[in-house]
Structure formats: structure tokens, C-alpha cells
Image (cartoon, grey):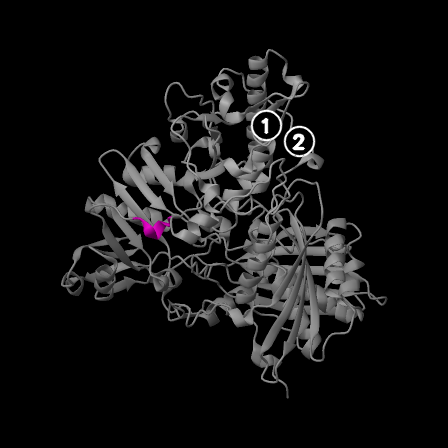
Amino acid sequence: MSKTTPTEDTLSTTRRGFLAGSGATALTLSFALPSTSRAAATAASDFVPNAWLRITPDGEITILCGSAEMGQGVLTAIPMMIAEELDADWRRVRVQQAPVDKAYANPAFQMQATGGSTTVRGHWEVVRKAGAAARAMLVAAAAEQWKTTPDKCRTQVGRVIHATDGRTARYGDLVALAAKQTAPANPPLKAAKDFKLIGQPLLRLDTPGKTDGSAKFGIDVNLPGMLVAVMLRSPLPGVKPGTVDDAGAKAVKGVKQVISLPSGVAVLATGYWAAKKGRDALKVSWDWGDKAGLSSAKISTQLREAAATPGAVAKTEGDAAAQQPAKRVEAVYEAPYLAHACMEPMNCTAWVKADEVEIWAGTQSQGPLQGILSQVASVQPGKVKVNTMMLGGGFGRRFAPDFVIDATLLSKISGQPVKLIYTREDDMAAGYFRPAAVTRFNGGVDAAGKPVLFTASVASPSIMAASGFMKIPESGVDSFAVEGIADHPYDIPHQRISYARAEPGPQVWFWRSVGHSQNSFFMEGYIDELAHAAGKDPFEFRRGLLGKSPRHLKVLELAAQKAGWGKPLPAGRHRGIAVVSSFGTVVAEVAEVSVAKDGTPTVHRVVAAVDCGQVVNPEIIHRQIEGSVVFGLTAALYGQITYKDGQVEQGNFHNYPLMRFNEMPKVDVHIVPSTEAPGGIGEPGTPPIAPAVANALFAATGKRLRSLPFDTAALKSA
């Protein structure tokens, strides 16, 4: 990938150069003024009107990012948006993780948190105005110095330039005067045609630290006197420890304490291996209550029975009950619970002192944690300091507070700093899962092959109820449970979509692309079934239903064109297609597959077309779509959490496998040019891949796969 930096000067620097340090004296400029910000704690002579950026007298620009970096690129995207409006010299830009402060609240959530592919689209105007306000103040400073007016000045590559005589002043030289200027309340923003940084594939600012080891993840934290904790966690929500025999654990060298919490039993030791060995020596009986004997078969039965009920109405159009299509298509689709399987296991280091708490964690929910931990530790929220570390994978899992709460409780009880580490087996066995779900479809086409009826009955647990901060509305419909189905783009006159809540027992949570992840597989698979019943090509069938959805139509056509839809393929290869809108972005994907005689599928190529509105950094978009394809393919081919006798059967990557390098298809990503406001990009590439592959497998074998992960035995040749 070539580096593109459109500036007047040739910008040539090393990756480490992007993270160059700043001086001691700083000019801090931002648009939203925080009430109290640790980021703004500088000398009295410094100019600190707000929180987003600071400029030192030597011209170094430090931008603070309040969102968590988990590989999605926010530590580059936020600086790019600010630097664009600032007309900054990109060579002088560095980035820091911001503290917890209301100034950094995600406008999409009204709290400081990272999720739902909202960072860029939520901050699109806020941070650009921060850069624009800073630029206006620097221009005003130069105008005052030159005894002219701001309209006689322009900016370029970190300098203010006099429009008439060509005099220049670097931003760093204007710090003192800029501190005396009044920040504009609503500074004008650039038109897209004037962007110089936004839209360019600039190198990521977090890459150097990740390659040289200087970037610190939660699991890297070490404190003097710190104990390490490993927990034997409750197998299901509501199942609490009964009797605890900790004699074996306390006999392990290095073990200092054994502490029972509502969520399990923790062993605290001088190091990880001692803690784990002690945990393994625990003998705990559990109070199962009515949770005993849970199995995957019981879960499936409960969901299928719920899907057969009328349910709460999520969407209705026309008169579905009165329709008698010429060809009726009925189908039941099913998806299992899924773990997030983050490469870095859950961990948090907490230190509870007399009147304050400090934690170090890779978390997606810094803001809410202040309030939660203030209650856990009985301190004021302002006395809770959250250090956001790099995240070794998030996917929604690190939005949950469980590991942070437990670490804080253990520090409070033990009186020492504690690093709590979940083993992968612990997190997988008692973790937060994507909901299992079943959807019953009933619809059909008329004699001309036009779809006239579409009904869907969705059954799944409720993420809204499980979240702890959301409530299911009076309608009874969890919007996450029906997204991807209730908001589908297809023009079908008679529809009814309903939701039936079923709670088999496991904890459910947000998973990359949330309800879209399973519902788009259901929806796009069923649309393919309608196309087959109509005797029409799946691509052409969708085209005919997207007249009212031009963005979907455009990406669908682009993906088909770039994939060579309708053109001959090598012998044994077949294509499938799907188009999905999620998180403000529309993605269409075409999968090219083949099937071995034993039923083993190979995905050779994936072509993706993306309309995510205004592009901030196209290289990040490419990487996110590629990563989403890996994530979605892993789930489609292998992913499932199964239960037997109340226990999860999976423990680590040996029985919860991930895609291997040799299984990875070639991925071609094509971006639709747009000046619309940005959509999300961290999640939208995941939903279309499973249905695109399933539809290709049907084209290859004539066998329809309606459950995840794919039952490849069903594809075996006779």
C-alpha cells in the first residue's frame, strides 16, 4: 500500500515518526469544552479551552481520541478528521488515548463508549468542528500579528499564509497569540471537494506501537504489589457457588487468597500460573436451581416453539393473512450461540484505595464504568479513573462490565491491586454470547414470479433485556432481535414480521453486527429461496425488488459487475450473492465457491461493494471488510456454542476453531464514491458473507443450508 499525503511539501517519515512526542508547553484546542478534564491539566500559562487537540510551540500536534482502539482504526480516523479541518501538517500529528470525560462522549450514545460502528459517523461533525475552531483561532492570531484581517489569510500544511504578500507563520509560532482568541461557536466546515487528508489511505498511527511492542494492552499492565486472579466462573447467569473447598487451592505455592463472588470463586496469587493452578484445585458445588440439565437440544426446541407463536408485531404492511401466493415458500432457519473469542482474553487491573479507584482495561465502555465502579467501590464517580488500554479484539464483548466489576471487587476485598485474567476456557464457558435464534418464514410469489407475501417470526433471547441499560419497549419487540429482517429493503406488498422472546438461560450480548449477523443469513437465504421458486436469477430477482432502495441497488450491481456475475467460471465453481444494510452502510458480497466430494466447501473469492458514505480512510475500509469476511466465514463454517448438562462444550480454539490462513479467500473490495455522511465500517462486512456462501453452495449442490454453522455433511456427493 502506497502512502498518499497530499501536501505542499513532500511528506516522508518513518512510522515511528508519526508517534513523535510533544513538548512540555502545549496549546490545547477543541470544540467541546469539558468541565473537568485530566487531558487539560497543563500549566496556567497554557491555552486550554477544551479537550480534542493541543499544539506545542515547536508545532507538534497531539490529538486525543475518546474511543477505544480495537483494530478498527479510530486512533487514525479521529486525527484525520480533526487534522483535515485544521489544515495540519500530517507529519506533526500524534494521537493519545483520552481520559474518561464527558467531553469525549460519543454523540451516538451520549456517553463515552465504543460500539455499533459509531465512532466516525457519531463524531463526524463534532471533531471536525474542533479542528475548524482551532484553525480559525490560529488564523485570527496570525492576522493580529500581521495587523490585517482573518479574511486576508489562508492555511496550508500547518501554516498560516498571508494571501497578499505571502508571509507565513507556522502553527507552533502562533501558540501564545492563539490563546488570546475567542473560539468560534459554529465554525464553517470544508466541502468534500476541498478535502486533502480525508479520503486518503494514510498509514495508521497505532501501527508503530503495535509493531515495536510499545503499545500496551490490558494484559500488559503490572503494578507493584499486584496480585493476579483467576476465577472459576459460574456456568450460567443466576447459578451461584454453593459449597467451596479451597484447601487444595491454598496449598499451591504463591496463592494468597480465595474469594467467593456472586459470579464465581477467585484465586489470588503472586502470578498467573500459581493463580490458575490454585483455581484448578478448587472444589466447588453449584446451586443450579432450575438451570440444571440445559442442553442444545432443549434450547433449539424452546426457540422453535416460540417462533411458532404469533409474537409481538415488529412490522406489518398490506394484508398478509389474506394472501394465497401461486407458489408458497416455507422455511425455518436457525443459528447457535456464538462466543466472541477475542485473541486477548478478558482482563482488568484494579486498584481500590480508601477513596478512589483506578483501573487499567481494554474496555469499550469507559464512561458507564465510572458510574458502575463508583457504586461497586463506594466512591464518587469523579474518583474513578479509567485507563483505556489497547484492545486485543472487542467485537462487542468488551462493552460488558463483568470482568471490570469482578476485578474491582477483588481489589476492594483483598486490599491490594489485582489483575483479573479470564482464561479463554473461562470466558467461553461462562461468557457473553451472540443469541441463538430461530426464524420461521412463510411467503411466496405469484404466477409471474413476483413476490407478494413475506412473513417472518423471529424467536431469540433479548439483548436489550440482558444489557442492563435498555428496556424492551411496550411493543414487546427487541429491535436487535429483528434488525436485518424488519428493515429489509425489498419491495414486497404484504408483510408481517414478529418477535417472540425466548430465554433458554445463557447470557447474551452484542456480537459483531449484532442481530444482523444471524438475521441477514436468514433473510438473504430466504430471498434466494423466493428467487428459486420464481425461476429467476438471484441477482436479477433482487434487482427487481430494489427500485425503492437505490443505495442497495447500486452496491448490488457493482458487486455483481466486479464479480463477473453471469460470466462462465472454472469447472466446479459457483457464485452466491447477498446485500445487507447495517450501521448506516450498505454492503453487497458475491462469494465464489466449490464443494469437494466429501462435502467440504472452499471459498475461493469474495467480491464486496461498499457504500459507507464519505470515506475517511479507504485503506481502513478495505481492512475492515477483509476482517469482517474472516469473522463471518469463521462463524458460518465453524462457530457454535453448544450445551450439555448445563455446561458449555467448547473451551478453546481446538473445539471452537477459527479460519486458517490456507482457508482465506481472495477478497476484492470496491468502494462506492459518496459525499453523504459516513456510515459505520467495523461491522457491516460481516452480515452478507454467510448468506452469500450459503447461496453459492446451493448453486453448487442444489442443497439449501438453513442453519449455522454449515452442515457440510449434507453437501456430500452421492
Residue range in magenta is: 216-221
Check residue 190 in the rendering and tell me which mark sits there, or answer none: 2
Residue type pointed to by label 1: Ala
Mark 2: give few (<14), some (14-19) or many (20+) Cα within 10 Å.
few
Asked if labels 1 and 2 touch by Cβ distance under 8 angstroms, the answer is yes
The single residue placed furthest to the bottom in the displayed view is 718
SS at circle 2: loop
Please identify the quadrant where the N terminus is shown: bottom right
Image coordinates of residue 212 in percent, x first then y, are 40, 52
In depth, the one of 36 and 17 nearer the eye is 17
Q: Is residue 149 above or below residue 160?
A: above
Residue 655: quarter of image: bottom left
Quickly name the residue at label 1: 132
Residue 701: quarter of image: bottom right
Left or right for 416, reference 30: left
In depth, the one of 306 and 180 nearer the eye is 180
SS at circle 1: helix
Do we see residue 405 in this rendering? yes
The single residue placed furthest to the top in the displayed view is 147
Q: Earlier in the sequence, mark 2 or mark 1?
A: 1
